[in-house]
Image: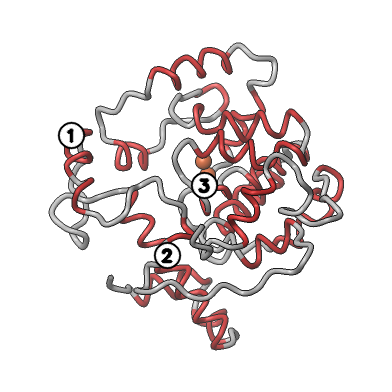
Amino acid sequence: MSIDQKDFVASLGGVAVVGGMSSEAKADALEDYLMQQLNDALNAPTLGGDSAPAKRYPTVAEIEAQIEKHPLRRGVGNLFYSSTGNVKRLPRMPEKPALADFFKMRFRATANHVLQSANLAKKNGMSEEIILACLLHDTVQELIKVDHGWWCAQLYEPYVSEKVAFAIRHHQTLRFYEDKANGYAYPELYRQMFGEDYKPEPYVEANYKFVRNHKWYIEPRMVTVNDLYAFQPGVNPQIEEFTDIIGRHFKQPKQGLGFDNSPVAHMWRSIIWPDHPL
Ligand SMILES: [Fe+2]
Ligand SMILES: [Fe+2]
């Protein structure tokens, strides 16, 4: 996989920012950059090879024809593969890990995206519950990408309000349906990722009808409005900026995430120990 050095430096905020980074931070940033490139390549197969820019959107049939050209299925979680050859040893997590520990030690491929979304939601004056939903909305993609709205809501359900879980669960569906009145257009990226002639599965269509008529429709809609795909150079919000909101709206279990015997504790343990063979 090739690296565009100018693009990489710009993505970190420019030469001055890079000059002030430790070599470890640079190595981490490079790994994140490569991981993002691989995600993009896996999620948006281009026609005519990895390095050729897409001249047009692929069709659903063309995307399906790519399945057998990759060693991984598109729904695999980010923690389970490496973009730089072999996977690295993960740092050992604290005995009673808190949400912020996962952001720092496990959510490496998704943290920047969700922090940027939460940052935008905050700037746009959204409620604290919507900001929290934005902060969490894609993090389960470290574990699994298929049906990530449902998986992600399940992962957080014991610890957040029903409204936050609703926003996380249904942002997945609403991503497919435009709502110009609320400032949401169908994303170009989806034409690339899913194919220009893609139609959501019937369960997604049915779920859209349900959510569209729900009294909390605006909650997941605002997650989609503040959902960013473009990397914003120089915008690197940190998890500490959301400590207060997490403190007010996230019920951190005292035993640590993964060890509270909740119905989703095993999901957190799988994120802690993705190298366990069974
Ligand atoms: Fe998402
Ligand atoms: Fe997102």
What kind of element bears circle 1? helix
Q: Amino acid at mark 3?
A: Leu
Q: Residue furthest front?
A: 278
What kind of element bears circle 3? loop
Q: CA distance from mark 3 to mark 1?
A: 27 Å
Which image quarter is the N terminus in? bottom left
In the image, the residue with mark 1 has its CB under 8 Å from the nearest atom of ligand 1: no
- Between circles 2 and 3, the one closer to the viewer is 2
Q: How is the image coloured?
A: secondary structure
What kind of element bears circle 2? helix
What residue does disc 3 label?
228
x%, y% of residue 274?
A: 53, 61
State the residue at coordinates (63%, 67%).
105
Q: What's the mark number on residue 243?
A: none
| Quadrant in the rendering for residue 133 | top right
Q: Nearer the viewer, residue 118 or 275?
A: 275
What residue does disc 1 label?
61
Q: Nearer the viewer, residue 260 or 27?
A: 260
Q: Nearer the viewer, residue 138 or 203?
A: 203
Is residue 166 rendered to the left or right of residue 224? right
Q: Residues within 10 Å of mark 1 (few under 14, many from 20)?
A: few
- Between circles 3 and 1, the one closer to the viewer is 1
Q: What's the mark number on residue 35?
A: 2
x%, y% of residue 147?
A: 48, 35
State the residue at coordinates (48%, 75%).
88
Q: CA distance from mark 2 to mark 3?
A: 17 Å
Badge 1 or badge 2: first in the primary sequence: 2
Q: Amino acid at mark 1?
A: Ala
Badge 2 or badge 3: first in the primary sequence: 2
Q: Residues within 10 Å of mark 2 (few under 14, many from 20)?
A: many
In the image, the residue with mark 3 has its CB under 8 Å from the nearest atom of ligand 2: yes
